[in-house]
Amino acid sequence: MRRIAVSVLGLVVVVGLAACREETSAVGRTAVAAMSGPDGDAMGEVVFTQGPNGVLISAEVSGLAPGPHGFHIHGVGACTPDFSAAGGHFDPDDEGHGFMHGESWHPGDLPNIHASDDGIARADYFADRVSLAAEADGSLFDADGSAIIIHAKPDSYGAEPGAGDRVACGVIERS
């Protein structure tokens, strides 16, 4: 009887460790979005790195007008035929828009990105409600994928986005 109990306990431990490994196996995974403008010219890239508590988003983009720009994850992994193919902001839980609005905002909302006088923007943001794991809540790799969009104007952070035209787009792809 003792051998059966020890064997069952051992099996439970092995299954539990496998589940933990599977749960954290996305840590360290990366994805990249090659950014391009409406004319198709390359504008840089945005790199996504899965951590244990969310995703680090690192951007280096050129060719922007100086100043702040809305910077969002969008719900469809497509940029063509025009940037509207990327759909609205990534919002798997049907949250409201804007950091300064309501109790919560959708995971696609990110802080504005700021371009210097030479049109180059570099930024690091941490998003704790998105994931690079295919089956995780907030996965950027759902059935239709995801994209990242840079807008002409800054996001209002309020209930209405108001960030203007889409000036750069990149489909988020595993790297």
Image (cartoon, rainbow, N blue to C red):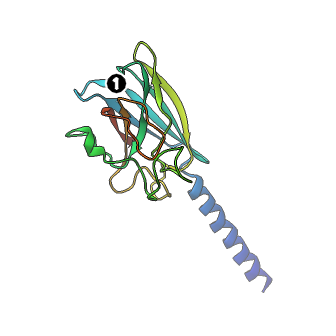
Q: Nearer the viewer, residue 9 or 56?
A: 56
Is 106 above or below relative to 61? below
Q: Residue at x 31, y 48 (%)?
A: 87
Q: Quadrant of the N terminus?
A: bottom right
Q: Position of residue 90 (x, y in %)?
A: 41, 49
Q: Secondary structure at mark 1?
A: strand
Vertical placement of residue 8 versus 87, above or below:
below
Q: Position of residue 88 (x, y in %)?
A: 34, 48
| Quadrant (top left, top right, bottom left, bottom right) of the C terminus | top left
Query: Which quadrant of the structure image shows residue 22?
Result: bottom right
What residue would you read off at disc 1?
A: 43
Q: Name the residue at the bottom extreme.
A: 1
The residue sitting at 34% across, 57% down in the picture is: 143
Tell me, yes or no, if residue 59 can be seen here. yes
**Farthest-out residue, right:** 2
Is 91 displayed left or right of 52 in the figure? Answer: left
Which amino acid lies under the numbered mark 1 shown in the image of this protein?
Answer: Met
